[in-house]
Amino acid sequence: MVIAVSLTAAFTGVLAVFAIVTAFFAIRAFRAQSRELGLLESQVKAQQQDREREAEEWRRDQAATIYVVVEVLRMNTSMGPEPTRVRARVHNTGRRPVYDVRVHWVDVSERVQLGDAHQLGTLGPGRDVVAHVPVEDVTSPERLVPVVFFLDSSSLRWSVLPDGHLAPVDAKLPVEAPLIAMTAVADASGDGKQAVPTE
């Protein structure tokens, strides 16, 4: 009986040692798996950030294919001189169309948008569209700056200025909002001043 109790105690002791050793290795394995899981999570996060950055670069590259050229037109006819006009020619040199193209005219000296934006619709690849506005004060047509608004193929909203300043447009603003143009001009000038939104 004493031998049986001694053997039971010995087996219990051995089992306890094995249980402790097993627990030790289980804890080590759990910690190693936790480290590996953390490493995998950080790799997945880095890959996701890379994909997002690449997608943003792709969208910006597409948006950068849209540019605007400004011309001042002073014309004389047989009836005499016509009013001076400022013309904005919007070009799409990309491979995809852009949508809901609008030209907002801003008088930068008065810091106001002149009237409503001109709606030009869809602009296909390799195409251009024109918007123009008469100038009352013929001595300073350079006061008028066209701000082009458009949607890219991913329905992201952009504004571009004649100097090439390209910026995303807040999705909360209605497409006809003068604040689109005023914000673009303020951002490009770097003064960040809030402009009067409409005339």
Image (cartoon, grey):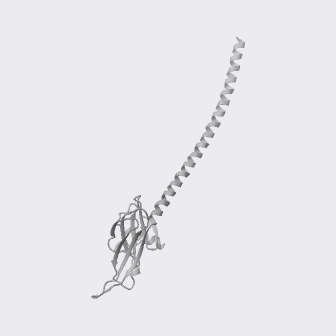
Q: Nearer the viewer, residue 116 or 153?
A: 153
Q: Residue at x 69, y 27 (%)?
A: 17
Q: Residue 185 is drawn in which quadrant?
A: bottom left
Q: Nearer the viewer, residue 21 or 144?
A: 144
Q: How many dots with numbers?
A: 0
Residue 125, above or below 42 = below
Residue that sits furthest to the top in the current view: 1
In the displayed structure image, the side of residue 135 where residue 56 appears, left or right: right
Residue 18, above or below 129 = above
Q: Residue at x 34, y 76 (%)?
A: 132
Q: Residue 157 is drawn in which quadrant?
A: bottom left
Residue 3, above or below 14 = above
Where residue 118 appears, as percent x and y from the top left, is 33, 70
Where residue 43 appears, as percent x and y from the top left, is 57, 49
In the displayed structure image, the side of residue 75 where residue 15 appears, left or right: right
Q: Residue at x 57, y 45 (%)?
A: 40
Q: Nearer the viewer, residue 11 or 175?
A: 175
Where residue 188 appears, as percent x and y from the top left, is 46, 72
Where residue 115 appears, as percent x and y from the top left, is 32, 73
Q: Quadrant of the C terminus?
A: bottom left
Residue 7, above or below 173 = above
Q: Is residue 193 visible?
A: no
In the displayed structure image, the side of residue 8 where residue 152 appears, left or right: left
Q: Is residue 9 visible?
A: yes
Q: Quadrant of the N terminus?
A: top right
